Amino acid sequence: STPSQRKNKKAWQDPAVKRFLVLAALYEVKRAYHLLEGLVQHEHYLAPGYSYREMSVNASQAYRDIFYRKVPNWPFDPPDPFRG
């Protein structure tokens, strides 16, 4: 390709960048899975009919369960592309 064509080439078309983006997508899917799994496990506690205090306790327990799930860390050196 000519220099002008190389200049116009998108960075994501590079095979290494494509693999990186696929891995990043898989990482995000895994995080979403853990979030949804935690919500499903606490679904019966987060239904209508509880008092304000009971719902607050149930919501905090669901949050704590989801927050402390073991989701693998980003496997590459910084910068993490999902932070700031």
Image (spheres, grey):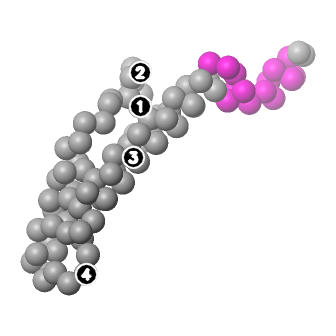
Q: Answer whether residue 47 is visible to the viewer in this image.
A: yes
Q: Are marks 1 and 2 in contact (CB under 8 Å)?
A: yes
Dividing the picture into quadrants, the one containing residue 16 is top right
Which residue lies at the image location 24% right of the left edge and 50% below the top edge? 66
Q: CA distance from mark 2 to mark 4?
A: 43 Å
Q: Which residue is mark 3?
A: 33
Q: Which residue is mark 1?
A: 80
In the rendering, at what x and y percent does residue 34 appear? 33, 46
Question: Which amino acid type is marked by label 4?
Answer: Pro
Pointer 3 local density, CA inside 10 Å: few below 14, some 14–19, many at least 20:
few
Question: Is 26 inside the magenta-drawn segment?
Answer: no
Question: Which amino acid type is marked by label 1?
Answer: Asp
Q: Secondary structure at mark 2?
A: loop
Query: Which dot, 3 or 2, sits closer to the camera?
Result: 3
Q: Answer whether residue 82 is visible to the viewer in this image.
A: no
Q: Which residue is mark 2?
A: 76
Q: CA distance from mark 1 to mark 2?
A: 8 Å
Which residue lies at the image location 38% right of the left edge and 43% below the top edge? 31
Residues drawn in magenta = 3-16
Q: Main secondary structure of the magenta part?
A: helix
